[in-house]
Amino acid sequence: AWIGTYFVCLAIAVLVNIFPFPNLALNKTRPIASIVFPIAIFFLSLIIMTSPQITSNSLMLVVMYIIVALPFGVWVWWKPVAWIGTYFVCLAIAVLVNIFPFPNLALNKTCHQLERFEKDITMLLLSTKIYSNNNGTNVKRARQAISTIEFMSTRIAATIASLKAELPATKVELRLLRWCGGAQAGRDLEAWIQQAERLLDPLQQLRSAVMQKVLGEGSNSSSPELAEAKVVLNGVIGSSRDRLIDAMVASIAVSHAWAHPSERRNILPNVKTELRQALLDCEHSFHLAICNAAHHKMEGASQREQTPLFAHLTRRMASFHAIFAVAESLLRYLENHDRLEDDKQGQNMEGRPKRKCCNPVRQKLSSYKTFCLQRWKWHSKDDRRMALKTALGMVFASFFVSMPYLKDMAAPYGTWPGITIAAVNQSTTGSSFHKAVDRLMATMIAGAFSLIVADFLDNDDVFKTVALTIFTFVTIYLRNAEHAYMYTYACISVGIMLFGSAKTDYDIEGYVPQRIELIFIGIIIFVFTELLLFPRSSRKIVETTSLDFCMSMKAFFKQAIVCSEKLEVYVNELKADSKHGTNKAVVILNESKDPFQLNVLYGIQSKLKAQSDTLCKEIDSAIAEPSLGMGQPLHAESFRRLVTQQRNSERQAALLCNTISKLVQYNQQEGHPMRGGFSTWPHVHRVALQEASGAMDSICCWLESVFPDGRIRAQERNSVKAVNAASTFRSLEDIREKIV
């Protein structure tokens, strides 16, 4: 993308200097140049920022270097050749430093991360087997298993995030290093990483199930009745559980061998059938075990004695349903992979023999056609805002090259305001402001170091090279993740200040203040366009989305009640049909494609997930966003905890969706243990959900009265109301205890 954009900008530069009208307008008549040139920059920036083929916003740097800095009227034929040569020398150096002396390939990192992912998830599954095998006699081993599940689930999430970050570079390296099969290897790797990402939610549900004590478990978790129930559970489900875990481990190993770039194998054992059968057997055994444990020694037991047992069964059900969700996800991946392989083999068997010479050319042309016909980014609101603010910022920056007074003031480095805008321009206000501050601080640090070097080393190139090397090594060594750009740009700025940028006949003492001044001007232009002309407040998004999440949760509970009511009616009709020989339950199923309105429930849950994802994406930018006296900054700790709790609530909502969906499936299966032994569970769900929904209605009413503008923030005279609204959340504790 960099090379392509460079040549596009270079071609435009050549045309501007060759075509008579723009050349005449920009050189002969200054007032016309001050009008035509900013307009041309606006449309050029707009086209580049909305083009789907360009994926990096910092490519606007190329526009500033080539178009804006173009020396009109001083054109010579060899300048484009010199620019191309210099550009390719820089690209070659950038590639060589990542190859010699030690290759720094993303492919190696990806292979290492894949191997760690396979080992970690295998260890997590084996620890789950140990945990569920515990019958209360070996507490130490059970606690070790819980700690392993907690640690591995956290590390798996970090590994998947690292794999996603390295995926684009890995796919490029696969295409370069493997001319034949590299693209397919990249697609297989991407599919496996996407599948691994889909496992995160059930793994988090598993972690929550084994770590958090359910209300009511309390100090009675080691009672003899509970220990005996654990023995009953393990006796019924033990063998089928071990079979399922072993099948899942084998499936992960096979999937890993398919996707691993250096271990790609096409002939592997068929684990799909074993996984499907093991899943069915384990589900049946688990439900039978739950029924046996629930009915075991319940005759004549008081409610206080029953509570610890049912609380433990709730934990076991949550953990096993998370395991079942992992197994079902793996099974779908294996089925999709086999289907794709069958399609490929069918095409090879039925199709004509491929010509070796023409097919690669045809594939490249087809890929190029798809690449060129992508949908432009103008249709997205955020992309449209990004393009407009970038183009307008470039217009203001181009004044320092086209307007006589500003050009003379900034000469010969009038491009730096535009380069600064292109560099700090980000999709969110907070991240852009954070990068702008980092750039300014880096420039000042590099300027101070350059002035020290100039004072002590008397402009000696050898000593300047040594000083630059030492400064770069120390700065990169001390770099941290929060301000990585500041450290990197400080190294870049030192080299420019010591050895020159566009000119070499200057003194460091004169260049450093001018560079700081022009970069500060660029930041002022950016702040003006970002905050005043195209405001997009991440803080406002977090405040409104946090409140919208509570309202969506209210709607979620309402819809869950509807689903439970319809399921309760269906179960009652099943009982009536078995007594009177009628067929009313079948009529309910045939009334619509979604008789229990589960699709509506899943739709609201998807909305909750989208809102939670938005909060997780915007929270860092919202905290870093400056208030500038026009609002109150977010309290970082409180809002981070709020976003975390809402993320956990969204995961529990997904678990509730899965629970109701499973109850629907179980009650439709003839002879299922849940259908006969727990036919009152839909009624229990409905009553519990009504209790929770009532509490959520009260909470939302308070929130709407406290925050009438739809934003969770401090407002005039709402402190007492805010405390009262917060206290209503504690009513959910009473609801939990009542449910248990």
Image (tube, rainbow, N blue to C red):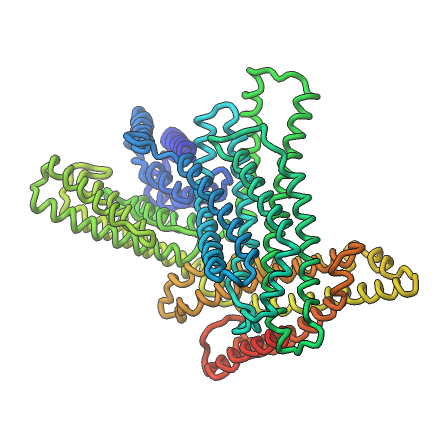
Q: In the image, is 416 to the left or to the right of 260?
A: left
- Can residue 83 be seen by looking at this rendering? no
645 vs 374, nearest the viewer: 645
In x, y percent, where is residue 474? 21, 46
Q: In the image, is 629 to the left or to the right of 593?
A: left
656 vs 23, nearest the viewer: 656
Quadrant location of the C terminus in the rendered image: bottom right
Residue furthest right as drawn: 581
- Can residue 538 be seen by looking at this rendering? yes
Q: In the image, is 344 to the left or to the right of 508?
A: right
Could you tell me which residue is drawn at 68 percent across and 44 percent down? Answer: 277
In x, y percent, where is residue 402? 32, 44
Could you tell me which residue is drawn at 51 percent across and 52 percent down? Answer: 127
Quadrant of the rendered structure where residue 696 is?
Answer: bottom right
In x, y percent, where is residue 76? 29, 26
- Compared to residue 719, the image places residue 157 above or below, namely above
- Compared to residue 665, the image places residue 333 above or below, namely above
Could you tell me which residue is drawn at 68 percent across and 54 percent down? Answer: 285
In x, y percent, where is residue 177? 44, 26
Quadrant location of the N terminus in the rendered image: top left
287 vs 679, nearest the viewer: 287
- Compared to residue 668, the image places residue 495 above or below, namely above
Q: In the image, is 635 to the left or to the right of 179?
A: left
How many dots with numbers?
A: 0
140 vs 320, nearest the viewer: 140
